[in-house]
Image (cartoon, rainbow, N blue to C red):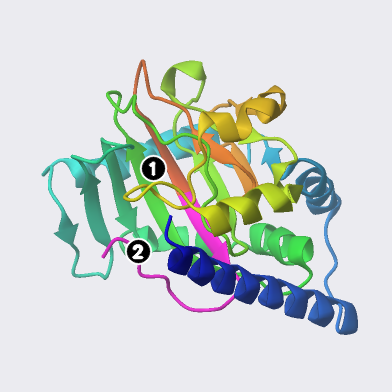
Amino acid sequence: MKLQTIADNVKSASRILRNDLDDRIVARRSPLQATLSPEQERVLTDMRRNGYAVVENYWNRDDALALRARLEAYLAEGRDRDFDEGAWLRFWDDRPYDQGVRRIYHVEKLVPELAALRFDPFILGVASAYYGVPFYSGVLVFQHNTQTNENTRFYHVDAFIREFKSFIYLDDVDEGNGPFAYLRGTQRNHFLRLRKQVIGNAEGESPTSFYEDDVRSLMDREDHIVGPAGTLILADVRGLHRGTPQADRSRSVLVNYIVRHEGDLVLDK
């Protein structure tokens, strides 16, 4: 890697660290005035310990399966599409990893009742309490991974900045259709993440991806989260995570990107 690239990475890392520190100062000076339910407190405890938490039966299973069928119908044309309502559909094909992924961004614009999920106070309350400052939904995404999607991305972080995600399974998920996986506790591995941010990866590869050699000593922390349709997962995605391969059948999920600043995120546009 060129020295200039490393120097640029150091500047970016320093800026992120300063932002993290500023938020910590704000959280101490002006603590959030929020009362969490006992279930939110339980989830928050799991988040702080493991980096993720699971709420079983958050949605009714039959309702989740029915929604999956409704949303998968938008994929029938088999091509990218921008909808008049403001959502957009993208097919991820001919990629080095995660081939066969289909995504509808801002899906609540097609299914307005999903706005309640995007701005769910249970989820946003946990995210804000976890960081000590307000966090907001940036985009709600419907994601469908086809059965042939065996070349899923290995362990990674979503970004080097702080980001929180919630997932709701719209399928019954077991080892055959790619459960979400997390290396428990790695949200606290700051040096590992900082080193990756500064040193980077080979040219042309995602800078937030980790190699097997990077995480070999951490694999005993690997958790696979299986569960019926309607299962809710909350995760600090600065911890190492991945979607495992859909070897036997497809999988659909709703993903809420929860970030520090208000406003709609424009991804893959």
**Horizontal side, residue 19 vs residue 39: left or right:** left
Residue drawn at the location 32% of the way across and 37% of the way down:
97
101 within the magenta span: no
**89 shown above or below 233:** below
**68 shown above or below 23:** above
Q: Are marks 1 and 2 in contact (CB under 8 Å)?
A: no
The answer to which of 60 and 246 lies nearer the viewer is: 246
The answer to which of 5 and 189 lies nearer the viewer is: 5
Q: Position of residue 66 (x, y in %)?
A: 38, 37
Range drawn in magenta:
255-269
Q: Secondary structure at mark 1?
A: helix
Q: Total label count? A: 2
Quadrant occupied by the N terminus: bottom left
Residue drawn at the location 69% of the way across and 71% of the way down:
17
Q: Secondary structure at mark 2?
A: loop
**Res. 12 in view:** yes
Could you say which quadrant of the image residue 94 lies in?
A: top left
Q: Earlier in the sequence, mark 1 or mark 2?
A: 1
Q: Position of residue 131 (x, y in %)?
A: 75, 65
**Horizontal side, residue 103 vs residue 127: left or right:** left
Quadrant occupied by the C terminus: bottom left
> Which residue is tagged 2?
267
Q: Amino acid at mark 1?
A: Leu
**Res. 237 in view:** no
> Which residue is tagged 1?
67
Outermost front residue: 3
Q: Mostly what secondary structure, the magenta segment?
A: loop
The answer to which of 26 and 228 lies nearer the viewer is: 26
